[in-house]
Image (cartoon, rainbow, N blue to C red):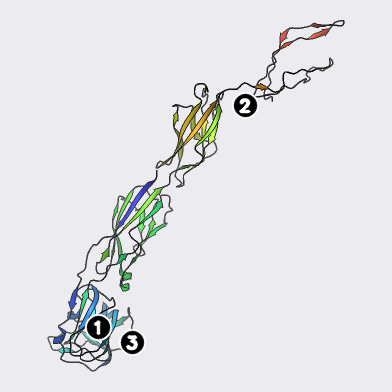
C-alpha cells in the first residue's frame, strides 16, 4: 500500500483597491489659452489630475487647439520632486476644437496617486484656463532628455500655478495576474532530499510592468505547528522541501496579488508517496528433510526499502499454524533469513508442506511474500558396492584395509557403518582350520561414500 501526503496550495482574493475612476476637468470648459512652446514636457501634479484609483489607463480626453503628435504619459511620484515614467502612448491629433477621446491600446499601469503628463513633439496642442481658482503644480519643461519607460526624473524648475489644462483620463480594471501552470498535480517520494525543488509556481501578468510587483503570500498552513515541511520562495514561486517529508495531509493557502488587489485562485496537489519495502525473491520454495534437528538457514531474503527507512521482516502467519520456522537476521549481515527452529520435530507423514507468509515493513507500508517448505521423508541409505567378496593372503598384516564400502544417502553425507557379521578367527592345525572365537565386532565409520 502506498501512503500519500496531499499538499494543496490555494490562491485566493484578499483585497481590492478601488478600481475605476475618471480624473480631471470637463475639457471643453478649460480652453481659454494655449501656449506656443515647442517640444515641451508637461508634468501635472495638481490634485485634480492625481489618480484616486488603481488599474490601467483606458482613455484620455482632450480639447485640442492644434494638430500634431503628442505622447500621453503616466508618472509616479517617488520622492520630493522625483518622478518615474510608468508608461506612454503616442497619438496623432488630427482635429481641433472638439472633445477628442483617445483610446489607449497599450496597457499602462496606474496606481492611486499617479499623475498625468504629456509631451508635445512640436507646438503646444492642449489649452488651459487660468485664474486664482484653477490648479497649481504644473511643471513645464523644455524637454531635451531622451527618456524611456522606467526613467526617473528630478524636477528642478518652479511649478506653474493657477492654470487647469483641458485634459481628462479614465482608469479601468486591468487584467488579473495568472498562475499559469496551476491547477497541477505532482508526485514526490517521502525520502526526497531536503532542499530539493519539487515544483515551480509560474505566473504572469499582461501588464509586464507589474510583474516585479506581484506578490505571492501564504496565509494558511496546516496541520504543522513547527517548521513547515514544504516552503515556497515567494519571489520565484519555487516549491522546495524544508524537512524530511512526513506522511499526512498539508494544506496551504497561496495568494498571487497585483498592486491593484487583483488575484488568481488555483490549486497545486503534491502527492508525497512512501515507497514500501520490496521483497524481490518471493514467492519461493525449498525442500527440507524431516530428520533435521538443528536451527538451519533455509533461504536468504532479498529485501530492501527504496525510501531508506528502517525495515524489519517477520513470519506473519503459517499454514498449518505454529509452524516450526522463524525469520531473523542472518548473523554478520543486514539480510533476513528463513530458518528452521531448533528440534522442529518434522514428520512428513503428518505435515508434508508448510506455507509461510513473510512480511517486511518500514512501519508505514508492508510488503508480503509466500514461502513454501516441502518436508521430505527420511530415505534408507543405499550400498553402492556390496555384496562383494575379497581374497587375502594369510600373510596380510593386521590393520590392512582389505575393502572400502561405498554407500549414498539423498539427505546427508554423514553416514554410520556397522560390521554386523560372524567373524571366525581360524588357526592352522595340521592341515585344517579351527575356530578360535565366535563374536560380533561392530565397526563405526563416518563420512564414508
* 278 with respect to 296 (left or right): left
Left or right of 446, for residue 175: left
- Labels 2, 3: front one: 2
Residue 98, placed above or below residue 287: below
**To which quarter of the image does residue 103 belong?**
bottom left
| Farthest right residue in view | 430
- In the image, 263 versus 163, the foreground residue is 263
The circle on residue 117 is 1
In the rendered image of this protein, does residue 240 appear above or below residue 335? below
Does residue 371 appear anywhere in the picture?
A: yes
Please state the horizontal and vertical placement of residue 104, each as a whole percent of the image. 26, 79
Determine contact: label 1, label 3, CB under 8 Å.
Answer: no
Image location of residue 178, percent across then percent down: 31, 65
Separation of disc 1 and disc 2 at Cα? 106 Å
Q: Is residue 238 above or below residue 31?
A: above
Q: To which quarter of the image does residue 276 belong? A: top left
Kind of element beneath mark 1: strand
Which disc number belongs to residue 145? 3
Side (left or right) of 268 relative to 307: left
Which residue is under mark 2? 410
At 52% from the left edge and 33% from the top edge, which residue is drawn?
285
User: In this view of the protein, can residue 165 be seen by the observer?
Assistant: no
SS assignment at label 2: loop
Q: Between disc 1 and disc 2, whose residue precedes? A: 1
Q: Which quarter shows the N terminus?
A: top left
Contact (Cβ within 8 Å) of mark 1 with mark 2: no
Q: Residue at x 30, y 82 (%)?
A: 153
Amino acid at each position: 500500500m502506498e501512503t500519500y501526503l496531499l499538499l494543496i496550495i490555494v490562491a485566493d482574493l484578499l483585497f481590492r483597491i478601488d478600481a475605476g475612476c475618471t480624473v480631471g476637468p470637463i475639457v471643453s470648459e478649460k480652453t481659454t489659452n494655449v501656449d506656443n512652446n515647442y517640444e515641451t514636457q508637461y508634468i501635472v501634479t495638481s490634485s485634480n489630475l492625481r489618480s484616486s484609483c488603481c488599474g490601467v489607463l483606458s482613455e484620455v480626453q482632450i480639447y485640442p487647439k492644434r494638430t500634431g503628435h503628442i505622447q500621453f504619459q503616466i508618472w509616479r511620484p517617488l520622492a520630493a520632486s522625483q518622478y518615474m515614467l510608468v508608461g506612454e502612448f503616442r497619438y496623432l491629433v488630427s482635429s481641433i476644437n472638439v472633445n477628442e477621446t483617445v483610446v489607449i491600446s497599450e496597457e499602462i499601469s496606474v496606481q492611486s496617486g499617479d499623475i498625468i503628463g504629456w509631451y508635445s513633439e512640436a507646438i503646444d496642442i492642449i489649452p488651459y484656463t487660468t485664474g486664482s481658482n484653477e490648479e497649481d503644480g504644473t511643471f513645464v519643461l523644455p524637454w531635451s532628455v531622451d527618456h524611456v519607460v522606467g526613467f526617473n526624473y528630478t524636477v528642478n524648475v518652479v511649478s506653474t500655478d493657477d492654470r487647469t489644462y483641458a485634459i481628462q483620463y479614465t482608469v479601468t480594471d486591468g487584467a488579473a495576474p495568472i498562475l499559469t501552470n496551476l491547477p497541477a498535480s505532482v508526485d514526490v517520494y517521502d525520502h526526497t532530499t531536503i532542499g530539493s525543488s519539487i515544483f515551480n509556481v509560474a505566473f504572469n501578468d499582461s501588464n509586464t510592468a507589474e510583474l516585479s510587483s506581484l506578490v505571492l503570500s501564504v496565509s494558511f498552513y496546516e496541520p504543522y505547528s513547527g517548521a513547515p515541511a514544504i516552503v515556497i520562495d515567494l519571489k520565484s514561486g519555487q516549491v522546495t522541501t524544508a524537512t524530511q517529508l512526513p506522511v499526512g495531509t498539508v494544506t496551504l493557502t497561496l495568494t498571487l496579488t497585483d498592486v491593484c488587489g487583483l488575484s488568481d485562485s488555483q490549486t497545486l496537489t503534491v502527492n508525497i508517496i512512501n515507497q514500501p519495502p520490496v521483497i524481490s525473491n518471493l514467492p519461493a520454495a525449498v525442500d527440507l528433510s524431516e530428520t533435521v534437528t538443528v536451527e538451519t538457514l533455509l533461504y536468504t531474503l532479498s529485501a530492501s526499502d527504496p525510501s531508506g527507512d528502517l525495515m524489519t521482516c517477520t513470519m506473519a502467519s503459517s499454514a498449518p499454524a505454529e509452524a516450526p520456522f522463524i525469520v531473523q537476521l542472518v548473523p554478520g549481515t543486514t539480510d533476513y533469513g528463513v530458518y528452521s527452529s531448533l528440534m522442529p520435530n518434522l514428520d512428513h507423514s503428518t505435515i508434508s508442506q508448510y506455507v509461510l507468509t513473510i512480511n517486511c515493513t518500514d512501519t508505514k507500508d508492508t510488503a508480503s511474500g509466500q514461502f513454501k517448505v516441502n518436508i521430505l521423508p527420511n530415505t534408507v541409505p543405499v550400498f553402492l558396492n556390496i555384496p562383494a567378496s575379497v581374497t587375502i593372503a594369510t600373510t596380510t598384516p593386521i590393520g590392512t584395509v582389505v575393502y572400502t564400502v561405498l554407500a549414498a544417502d539423498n539427505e546427508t553425507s554423514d553416514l554410520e557403518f556397522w560390521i554386523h557379521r560372524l567373524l571366525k578367527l581360524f588357526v592352522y592345525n595340521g592341515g585344517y582350520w579351527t575356530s578360535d572365537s565366535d563374536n560380533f565386532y561392530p565397526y563405526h565409520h563416518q563420512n564414508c561414500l
